[in-house]
Image: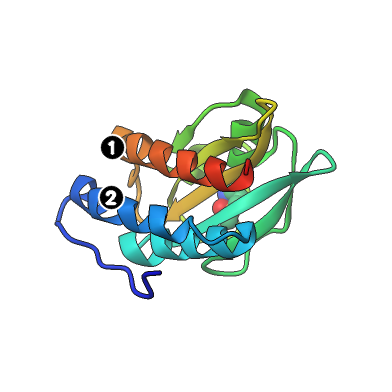
Amino acid sequence: MAETITINGTTRHEQYESLLPQLKSLAKEPDQYAALGNIISALKYGLGFFWVGAYIVKNNELILGPFQGTVACTRIGFGKGVCGHAWKDKKVVIVDNVNTFEGHIACSSESKSEIVLPIYGKSGDVVMVLDIDSDRLADFSSVDEQWLGKVVNIIEGIVNK
Ligand code: SME
């Protein structure tokens, strides 16, 4: 298993392209939390995001799971914040400026923009969300959505084994 992550390229597209096979390799670890923890670390440190983590659906709430970054809020209700919104509406949510998103839950004033992607279980229900925060405004585009969709597929492979 790779113990260091190597990122090639200057554009984010190129960086995701070099990161993806390494994420697939990390996903081979049989324990789902060990695999997920490493994938989240590789995303945070490989691409230099401010915060990357999973919120896991438990008893109709999102509970903080494996993450890399500053201390974060631990529980998010259905439909609350950007994460709860992505869960409720079953869609990817990109927020260019978190201060203009009504109901945004601020875990850190450093966080300026955000993307949240739902992760689906076998039944088609959302079982967790992947939350990525940037300390730059409007840092996420369709390029991130497209590549992170592939990351979601890898994570779904881990959680639906
Ligand atoms: N901003 C998120 C909460 C989680 S933190 O960003 C880590 C939200 O509004 O759902």
Which residue occupies 49% across, 59% down?
A: 40
Instruction: Say which amino acid is labelled 2.
Output: Tyr
Question: Would you name the residue on which mark 1 appears?
Answer: 143
The mark found on residue 16 in the picture is 2
State the residue lying farthest toward the bottom: 3
Which residue occupies 34% across, 40% down?
A: 147
Residue 119 position within the rendered picture, expressed as x and y whole percent measured from the top left: 58, 38
Secondary structure of the residue carrying numbered label 1: helix
Question: Looking at the image, is 62 positioned above or below residue 48?
Answer: above
Q: Do the residues labelled 2 and 1 touch (CB within 8 Å)?
A: yes
Residue 73 position within the rendered picture, expressed as x and y whole percent measured from the top left: 68, 59
Instruction: Say which amino acid is labelled 1.
Output: Val
Residue 135 visible in the displayed image? no
> How far is the residue under mark 2 from the one under mark 1?
9 Å
Residue behind label 2 places its C-beta within 8 angstroms of ligand 1: no
Question: Looking at the image, is 58 positioned above or below residue 107?
Answer: above
Question: Looking at the image, is 82 positioned above or below residue 88?
Answer: below
Determine crowd level at label 2: few under 14, some 14-19, many 20+ residues with C-alpha closer than 10 A. many
